[in-house]
Amino acid sequence: MRFGGLTAVRSVDFTVNSGEIVGLIGPNGAGKTTFFNCLTGLYVPTEGTVSYKGTVLPPKPHLVTKAGIARTFQNIRLFANMTVLENVLVGRHTRTKEGLWSALLRGPGFKKAEKASEERAMELLEFIGLAHKRDHLARNLPYGEQRKLEIARALASEPGLLLLDEPTAGMNPQETRATEELVFAIRDKGIAVLVIEHDMRFIFNLCDRVAVLVQGEKLVEGTSDVVQADERVVAAYLGEPFEATPEDTQPATEAESTTSTKGEAQ
Ligand SMILES: Nc1ncnc2c1ncn2[C@@H]1O[C@H](COP(=O)(O)OP(=O)(O)OP(=O)(O)O)[C@@H](O)[C@H]1O
Ligand SMILES: [Mg+2]
């Protein structure tokens, strides 16, 4: 994926098996989000294709969702003036077969499908712990709950692969821990999870494997231990070793990272 003279993501192969959590880390501007945008059809790659389970995906978001890939966004994208339940129902539309006429005429088929959709949406709200807020407007939820609601909306399309772009950004430690539990629970449902995050503790606790993207290319991929011990990763995140000055009483901030990718998600 190129933007003018900048290659944001270059030839990144990726395998995420069902029931597995894989982390995608790398400095700011590494191409992590661009990779997700290519996978989900928001960007059309300058060259190359995206395939999922051996099938090339057309770069159209609704077709990608239909094929089984769902995502959340780095900057929360909810329908602010819709209720919590309605936001999840929106996520289900690629899975409902009822067409426009059926919806307009509100025949028995439509009503039945609508009821089933609502039941499934409520199940998902229970799963994320927001069932009691079904009728609240999304914009009135605290930030951490908005992030959870985005995950529920993504799950509503019944994905085989879930892409999470910085799911704990802006969360307090307690909310981050709860998100960790939620991602484990999603994994336990047999869904493949690919997660971008700058919080290294979160990533290394959570992930079976971690890939590091730097300037659009995959630098290293391996288990948490292997990646943490890799000198190139330390250099990419923290730059040159620095000596603390007396004013520098704060511990070194948690690593930030860059990432990029293109390729196959399965
Ligand atoms: N639509 C666009 N037009 C031009 N350049 C873009 C566009 N989208 C991303 N880029 C550039 O591509 C590079 C990768 O950006 P990207 O947002 O993918 O990084 P990231 O790894 O997600 O970073 P962060 O950790 O800060 O979210 C950056 O240099 C960015 O400025
Ligand atoms: Mg990003």
Image (cartoon, rainbow, N blue to C red):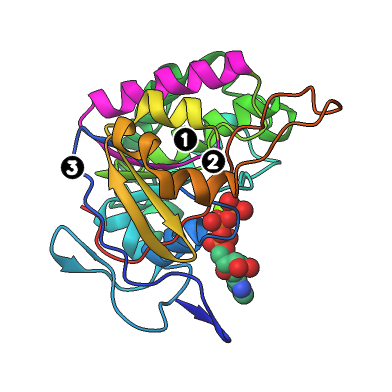
| Ligand 2 neighbours mark 2 (CB distance < 8 Å) | yes
What percent of the width, then of the height, locates residue 188? 24, 23
Disc 1 residue type (three-letter): Ile
Whole-Å distance between the Cαs marked 2 and 1? Answer: 11 Å
**Which of the 4 image quadrants contains residue 264?**
bottom left
| Ligand 1 neighbours mark 3 (CB distance < 8 Å) | no
Q: Which mark is residue 166?
A: 2
Report which residue position mark 1 lands on: 151
Query: Residue most toward the right?
Result: 247
Report which residue position mark 3 lands on: 17
Q: Which mark is residue 181?
A: none
Foreground residue, 94 or 108? 94
Q: Is residue 262 in view?
A: yes
Nearest-to-viewer mark from 3 and 1 = 3
- Earlier-in-chain disc, 3 versus 1: 3
Q: How crowded is mark 1: few (under 14 residues within 10 Å), some or many (20 or more)?
A: many
Q: Please identify the dominant SS of the magenta region.
A: helix
Q: Is residue 246 magenta?
A: no
Disc 2 residue type (three-letter): Glu
Asked whether the beta carbons under mark 3 and mark 1 sit within 8 Å of each other, the answer is no
Whole-Å distance between the Cαs marked 3 and 1? Answer: 19 Å
Above/below status of 222 relative to 104 = above
Secondary-structure class at tag 1: helix
- Tell me which residue sits at (33%, 61%) in the image: 64
- Earlier-in-chain disc, 3 versus 2: 3
- Earlier-in-chain disc, 2 versus 1: 1
Q: Does the magenta stretch include residue 190?
A: yes
Foreground residue, 44 or 10? 10
The magenta-colored residue range is 173-198
